[in-house]
Image (cartoon, grey):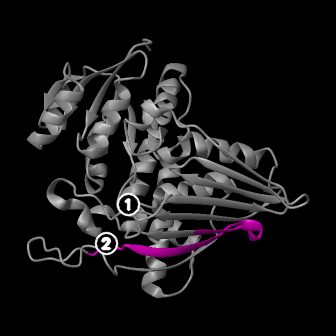
């Protein structure tokens, strides 16, 4: 594999352009092609990657075979279809979350990805922000002792507008707890180093998008939820999501509590708080986020870290750090949470993973 990697991007809307901005500053990387059926999105890509060929049809771009690696950032409900075409190539692939919008598609994609000839990486970039890397490092070092409880709070703005308003309907997104929260379910699995046992959720659409109409239809995406996840050994995790709570200092608050202490990370402030039970001492520090990377996207520099690791895996011939199986399990956790809301009861994770 040549050290200089040629990239293409399918889908140059909001997230696709974030990838383009980060690819532009990665060493020994060149974006040579972009594809999007929406002319304004192609115009945006042209500004960010002026030397890249622009295509309206990703299939035509794939036929050109002018690149080594591919980022897919198309609308959620198109992921499985796009990947069907990509699996006929040997390209290295980073597919944005979620892997797919249905468990059926996610399982099928994960099975095919096992045999894909290139590196196959799922874009769950929250793992790669500097504060999150530091938080996990402190936990692994034993600063909190044996992990007992994990909570993730995201209080943020409503879903942003997307081309064709596709993200206003669960049929296109997979539902809020798949579309938005697969990131947090991935963090739960990463932090606990375990798989869920059962999931219990309560959620609804109480505030956002209720006065919007698209072809006479009202959006049906949840705007708030609590999700409790039981892990083996009595470890518990909780997600607190509210998407009409943008009027706050920190949008994300991640807390890990062990038998010896407590670790807390606040974003975007980057504040890391470490508490020790025995001494009652509390340490505060700010984990710096590169301001230049911060300007390139909405994920605290995490997109750069993710793409850098993806490129390293390609060059070194190593396995993806975030696999198709990881992507499948995050979709399954979101699907289980939606099923729990529908039933009003806890859902065994094995039931969802093994359902037809």
Q: Is residue 142 among the parts visible in the rendering?
A: yes
First to last magenta residue range: 220-238
For the point 46% across and 86% down, which residue is it? 343
Q: Is residue 354 magenta?
A: no
Residue drawn at (58%, 54%) of the image: 266
Q: Taking 264 as reference, is 242 left or right?
A: left
Label 2 element class: loop
Question: Residue 114 location, x and y as percent?
Answer: 48, 42
Identify the residue at the far bottom of this view: 344
In front of the other: 159 or 110: 159
In the shown orientation, is residue 228 left or right of residue 241? right
Q: Position of residue 238 (x, y in %)?
A: 60, 70
Tell me if mark 2 has few (under 14), some (14-19) or many (20+) residues whose alpha carbon lies within 10 angstroms of its own. many
Quarter where residue 92 is shown: top left
Mark closer to the chain start, 2 or 1: 1
Q: Is residue 162 above or below residue 344?
A: above
Asked whether residue 119 appears in the rendered view, the answer is: no
Task: Name the mark on residue 179.
Answer: 1
Q: Nearer the viewer, residue 184 or 256?
A: 256
Q: Is residue 67 above or below residue 278?
A: above
**Magenta stretch containing residue 233, yes or no?**
yes
Give the side of residue 82 with respect to residue 217, left or right.
right
**Residue tagged by mark 2?**
221
């Amino acid at each position: 594999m040549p050290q200089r990697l040629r990239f293409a991007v399918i889908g140059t809307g909001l997230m696709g352009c974030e990838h383009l901005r980060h690819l532009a500053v990665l060493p020994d990387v060149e974006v040579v092609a972009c594809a999007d059926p929406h002319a304004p999105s192609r115009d945006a890509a042209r500004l960010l990657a002026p030397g890249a060929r622009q295509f309206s049809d990703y299939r035509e771009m794939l036929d050109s075979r002018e690149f080594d690696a591919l980022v897919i950032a198309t609308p959620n409900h198109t992921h499985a279809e796009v990947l069907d075409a990509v699996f006929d190539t040997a390209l290295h692939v980073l597919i944005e979350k979620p892997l797919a919008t249905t468990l059926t598609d996610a399982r099928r994609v994960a099975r095919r990805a096992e045999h894909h000839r290139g590196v196959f990486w799922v874009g769950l970039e929250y793992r790669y922000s500097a504060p999150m890397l530091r938080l996990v490092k402190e936990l692994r070092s034993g600063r909190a002792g044996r992990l007992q409880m994990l909570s993730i709070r995201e209080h943020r703005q409503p879903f942003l507008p997307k081309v064709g308003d596709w993200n206003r309907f669960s049929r296109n997104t997979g539902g809020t707890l798949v579309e938005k929260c697969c990131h947090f379910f991935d963090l739960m699995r990463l932090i606990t180093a375990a798989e869920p046992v059962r999931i219990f959720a309560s959620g609804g659409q109480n505030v956002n998008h209720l006065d919007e109409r698209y072809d006479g239809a009202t959006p049906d995406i949840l705007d708030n939820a609590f999700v409790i996840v039981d892990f083996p050994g009595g470890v518990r995790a909780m997600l607190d999501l509210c998407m009409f709570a943008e009027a706050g200092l920190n949008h994300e608050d991640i807390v890990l509590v062990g038998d010896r202490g407590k670790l807390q990370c606040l974003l975007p402030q980057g504040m890391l708080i470490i508490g020790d039970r025995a001494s009652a001492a509390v340490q505060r520090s700010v984990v710096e986020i590169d301001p230049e990377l911060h300007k390139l996207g909405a994920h605290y520099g995490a997109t750069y870290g993710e793409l850098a690791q993806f490129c390293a895996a390609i060059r070194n011939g190593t396995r993806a750090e975030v696999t198709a199986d990881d992507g499948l399990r995050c979709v399954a956790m979101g699907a289980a949470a939606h099923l729990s809301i529908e039933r009003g009861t806890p859902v065994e994770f094995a039931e969802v993973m093994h359902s037809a």
